[in-house]
Amino acid sequence: MKKIFNMSNPKVERVLADLKRLGYRLTRPRRSVLQVLMEADDCLRPEEIHVRARRYCPTLGLVTVYRTLSLLSGMDHVRRVHREDGCHGYARTELAHGHHLICRDCHQVIEFPGLDDLSLLIDPIERETGFLVEDHLLELLGLCPACQG
Amino acid sequence: MKKIFNMSNPKVERVLADLKRLGYRLTRPRRSVLQVLMEADDCLRPEEIHVRARRYCPTLGLVTVYRTLSLLSGMDHVRRVHREDGCHGYARTELAHGHHLICRDCHQVIEFPGLDDLSLLIDPIERETGFLVEDHLLELLGLCPACQG
DNA sequence: GTGAATGCAAACTATTTGCAAAGGT
DNA sequence: ACCTTTGCAAATAGTTTGCATTCAC
């Protein structure tokens, strides 16, 4: 199989392998979207992904971006995150593990690490409600240092 | 001022008073939307609010529902909550304090009470990042009792 | 009476679908 | 060669805007 992009990214390779394993075809448009998602350090809207990915696949259509995002989030390689303005951003799963600081002024989204253990919080809730909690999303809203002036 | 609805709700009255205080007019469409929001025990989409509120104000337009929701959430009497399907629900602030259990199968959203004190979690983050946290959104994703079969 | 608020229609934005053409295996 | 995937155009869903009319004050 011929090499398409000169930069190669192990995260991209891993997802490509998974796609192949499941019988999906490794197309140029899919690679381009994947490349953009895996090299990004924040969450991107479909339109932004479209613009960036055309660097790798100039004929890429926005529709294909949507379809690829849907495929990848179904496989849990990317996560969809809700934005204050009502539309959605997408980020690779490791980035989007549910902990965000969102500035209500400049709208920047900061990931914060750690804190994966919310079991003190979650365990009693599971017991009381019978709900089986598989994942969590925690967003903290406020003002970033720069916007507190 | 003449009584419009036979049922009267102290929560509705409180918000009406606040609207008046700020110089907004107490119109029938606004009352109808407010009535629906304050008597509901879950979060509603604008369309649902529109349908229900026409019981109180038959000429109510969907546009006015949106405008009223925007006004009320600006005053923080209602909160907008993100739904998995991409559109939004609105609920009175007491209901929507940011804690949801969302079932990935039947998509029902359950509010869970208490747990307002996340300061153990939030304080260290504020210290480390310089972020000023004003509010939080916590969603737990998983399976409700009925969908665990 | 006056200006804020409403309802309609139309605009707009984000996203999805139908279908013929292109491309991976 | 086959059948998935693509890109386009058009459809759809949620939400916002322009404007003449209505209504609270």
Image: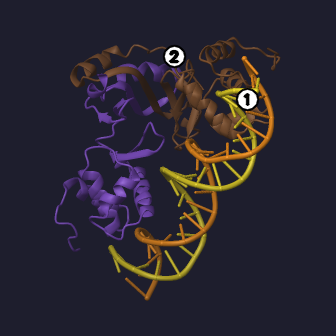
Chain colours: A brown, B purple, C orange, D yellow
Q: Closer to the camera, B64 or B142?
A: B142
Instruction: In the rendered view, tell whether residue B94 sits above or below residue A14.
Output: below
Q: Residue at x 23, y 19 (%)?
A: A127
SS at mark 1 in the image: helix
Where is mark 2, residue-wise?
Answer: A113
The residue depicted at 37 percent of the width and 16 percent of the height is A118
- Chain letter for mark 2: A
Dot 1 amino acid type: Pro
Q: Is residue A135 above or below residue B114?
A: above
Q: Quadrant of residue A147?
A: top right
The residue tagged 1 is: A29
Q: Marks 1 and 2: same chain?
A: yes
Q: Gap between marks 1 and 2, in whole Å?
A: 32 Å
User: Mark 2 belongs to which amino acid?
Assistant: Pro
Residue B81 seen in the figure = yes
- In the displayed structure, would residue A149 be above or below residue B143? below
| Residue sitting at x 30%, y 58% | B52
Residue B26, percent from left and from top: 32, 67
Looking at the image, residue A132 sits to the left or right of residue B137; the answer is: left
Q: Is residue A149 visible to us here? A: no
**Where's residue A46, x and y in %?**
64, 37
- Is A20 on the left-hand or right-hand side of B125? right
* Occupied quadrant, residue A2: top right
Of labels 1 and 2, earlier in sequence is 1
Q: Kindly report which numbered mark, 1 or 2, lies closer to the viewer in this rendering.
A: 1
Question: Is B51 in front, or is A20?
Answer: A20
**Residue nearest the viewer, comparing A73 with A116:** A73
Looking at the rendered structure, the secondary structure element under dot 2 is loop
